[in-house]
Amino acid sequence: MSADLTTRVGAVALEHPVMNASGTLDPLAARDAGLEIHRELALVVTKTVTPLAREGNEAPRVCEVPGGMLNSIGLPNPGLTAFADTTLSEVRALGRPLVVSIGGFEHADYELACRRLDGEAGIAALELNVSCPNVKSGCISIGSDPAETEAVVRLCRSVTDLPLWVKLSPNSADLAAIAAAAEHGGADALVLTNTLRALAIDHRTLQPLLGGITGGLSGPALKPVALAAVHTCREACALPIVGVGGIASGWDALEFMAAGASAVQVGSAAFREPLLARRVRDELATLLAERDLTADSVVKTTTLD
């Protein structure tokens, strides 16, 4: 069984609602496993790039916990110049439009990235990461304050015509206020959510398992939190939403769409199952066909009281 999977995230038209989450796609591993990236991901979302190169946090950076995993990667990346000069052409060669994730430690960092990437071929949108919990300044400190969020989005809006997707954190005390601030600043969509700040203890040493002490929780345990975030923000503003957090099946994707998401991103579950995006897409098509629904109609007709 199949269904019409076409949908939109604002001005960005998608063949189907499934893409990868930032930092979770290893193109070589996915291709070796048989994932046809050029047609099985609606868009390719890049790892977050910052103005200057970063090595990331101290190892260990990843550990398993009940209900998912923690990561304290720390945004390692080659920096904006190397990304634009080299990495961008490599990810563009994957054959899909790109969503470039950008992060920073002050407002000017985001402005710089938007200005540099504006006009580059193959970029469908910029994802403003104002929610990473694994760096000591910037990112989540910006995305936890409505005024800061609105200011950085407004600044980015002034230097680029590319759609701006703002990735928010479930750690925020008032997520509805942050979502409304992003909308007021000129955002085109929200991405909900980033990981939850969490801690794991080594039973042998009684010390934190991660070199960065705390990390971000992803996986099944995050899904109910992310679903609530989608529902909260859908009621708080009119922006389209991309849902992410614990998605590992077509049912998971459909739940996010029922909560108000126009599209979804698959993340940590793809580390264990490189072909996950294909299965989520195919299962979603069957579930929609069984209910005589299209992907676009779910968000428009479903309401949660």
Image (tube, rainbow, N blue to C red):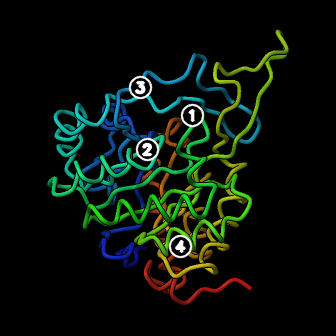
Secondary structure category for the residue under label 2? loop
Foreground: 223 or 76?
76
Residue, far top: 205
| Precedes in sequence: disc 4 or disc 1 | 1
Q: Where is residue 58 in the image (x, y as percent from the top left)?
A: 57, 17
| Precedes in sequence: disc 2 or disc 1 | 2
The residue to which callout 4 is attached is 287
Which tag is nearer the camera, tag 4 or tag 2? Answer: 2
Tags 2 and 1 touching, CB below 8 Å: yes
| Precedes in sequence: disc 4 or disc 2 | 2
Q: Quadrant of the N terminus?
A: bottom left
Q: Residue 169 carries which label?
A: none
The part of the image, by quadrant, that contains residue 23 is top left
Residue in the image at 24% along x and 54% along y: 96
Left or right, 38 with respect to 243, comes to left
Tags 4 and 2 touching, CB below 8 Å: no
Left or right, 114 with respect to 274, comes to left
Secondary structure category for the residue under label 4? helix
Secondary structure category for the residue under label 1? loop
| Precedes in sequence: disc 3 or disc 1 | 3
The residue to which callout 3 is attached is 54
The residue to which callout 2 is attached is 103
| C-alpha span from label 4 to label 3 | 42 Å
Amino acid on which the number 1 mark rests in the picture: Val
Residue in the image at 77% along x and 28% along y: 200
Badge 3 density bin: few <14, some 14–19, many ≥20, Cα 10 Å = some
